[in-house]
Image (cartoon, rainbow, N blue to C red):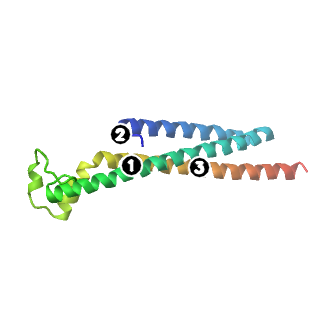
Amino acid sequence: MTVYNNEELKKLSEQIQTEWTKNIDDLTPLIRNKINDIIDANALAVSYRTMLVDRVKYFVDELSSILKIHKQLKAEKFIYYATGLLPDGTKPPRTHPIVSHKKNKGETDMLISSDLNDVELSIDIIENLLNFLRDQIKTLDQFMYAVKNRLEIYNILNS
């Protein structure tokens, strides 16, 4: 897994969204033109769809890696806040005063969530990007269906 700085991850997400919005916007006028343009647009849409599926797979793999790390860190933080010990069973050299106080589950969950804020932000950014990419795939599917219908109409009118 690539470890991301959240600012870099946001920039990457924005860049990908801008790129794919432009790519799909550029396809739309082609369906209104000559039959050769329509056929080329369909081929391009299929190619774009394949590229998007590859991107989705990549980011699903990244998300899986981050979720695994998140679960491990969450367990480690729970052990720390519940017992005051590190996961290997040793006491940390300096213990935060809040660790030695008795806490209920809500307080423990809030502390853990606070400690894992950066990881959770990375998860949110990747999930939002995945939703965007999946929506773009749906848009391309609809586009290809429109191309199919357009070609059928063209064939009917020219037969």
Q: CA distance from mark 2 to mark 3?
A: 25 Å
Q: Which residue is at 85% across, 50% downward?
A: 155
Labelled pair 1, 3 in contact (Cβ < 8 Å): no
SS at mark 1?
helix
SS at mark 3?
helix
The amino acid type of the residue labelled 1 equals Ile
**Is residue 153 or residue 9 the one in the foreground?**
9
Q: Which residue is mark 2?
A: 6
* Mark 2 or mark 3, whichever is nearer to me: 2
For label 3, the crowd category at 10 Å Cα-Cα, with few meaning under 14, some 14 to 19 and many 20 or more, is many
Which of pointers 1 and 2 lies earlier in the amino acid sequence? 2
**Is residue 29 or residue 77 the one in the foreground?**
77
**Is residue 38 or residue 82 the one in the foreground?**
82
Q: Is residue 99 left or right of residue 11?
A: left
Q: Which residue is mark 3?
A: 137
Q: Which residue is at 68% across, 40% downward?
A: 44
Q: CA distance from mark 1 to mark 2?
A: 12 Å
Q: Is residue 49 left or right of residue 80?
A: right
For label 2, the crowd category at 10 Å Cα-Cα, with few meaning under 14, some 14 to 19 and many 20 or more, is some
The amino acid type of the residue labelled 2 equals Asn
Residue 58: give x, y in percent of width and height: 51, 45
SS at mark 2?
helix
Q: CA distance from mark 1 to mark 3?
A: 24 Å
Q: Which residue is at 50% across, 48% downward?
A: 132
The amino acid type of the residue labelled 3 equals Ile
Q: Which residue is mark 1?
A: 66
Rendered position, 82 above or below 5: below
Question: Which residue occupies the extreme right position in the image?
Answer: 159
